[in-house]
Amino acid sequence: MSLPNTTGMLQLMSDVVSLPTWLTYQQIAERLGLRSASAAAARARRAKWPRRIKNDTLEAEVCVPADLVAAGPQKIAATRAVLRSGLVSSIVTDAEIAAAVLA
C-alpha cells in the first residue's frame, strides 16, 4: 500500500524551523547595518551570542538568530536617516521615524 501524495499539504522542515546563522563580525555589520565590525562585536557580547573560531582562517564567528538576520537593517537605517536629517529633538517615536522615512 502506498502513501498518498502529500507534497502540497506539508511544509518543509526548513520552512518551519529557522536555523541560526554563523557570521563574522564584518558580515554582521553589513547585514544589520552597523557602522563597523567592532560595533557588531559589541552587540554580540551584549546579546551573549555563542562564538567560535574558524580553524582555517582563525576568524571569529558568532551565531546570530535567524529572525534578526532576516529582518535586516531596515529599522536601524531608518533611525539613522532621521538622525541625519535633523528631525530629532529629544524623543522620537517609531511613528515619527516611519513618517520621515516614507516621506
Image (cartoon, helix red, strand yellow):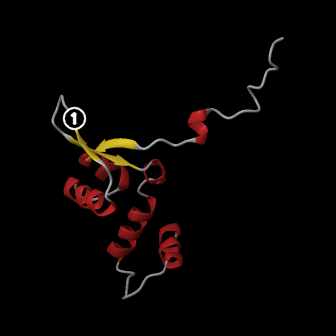
Q: Residue furthest left?
A: 58
The image quarter containing residue 15 is top right
Residue in front for this viewpoint, 79 or 99: 79
Q: Give the residue drawn at x 34%, y 56%.
A: 33
Q: Give the residue drawn at x 18%, y 39%.
A: 59
Q: Give the residue drawn at x 82%, y 20%.
A: 4
* Residue kind at label 1, given as amino acid type: Lys
55 relative to 3, above or below: below
The image quarter containing residue 38 is bottom left
Q: Residue furthest top?
A: 1
Q: Provide the residue designation for mark 1.
A: 54
Image position, residue 22 (x, y; %): 34, 41
24 relative to 81, above or below: above
Residue in front for this viewpoint, 97 or 43: 43
Q: Left or right: where does residue 54 sit relative to residue 97? A: left
Q: Left or right: where does residue 85 sit relative to residue 40? A: right
Helix, strand or loop status at disc 1: loop
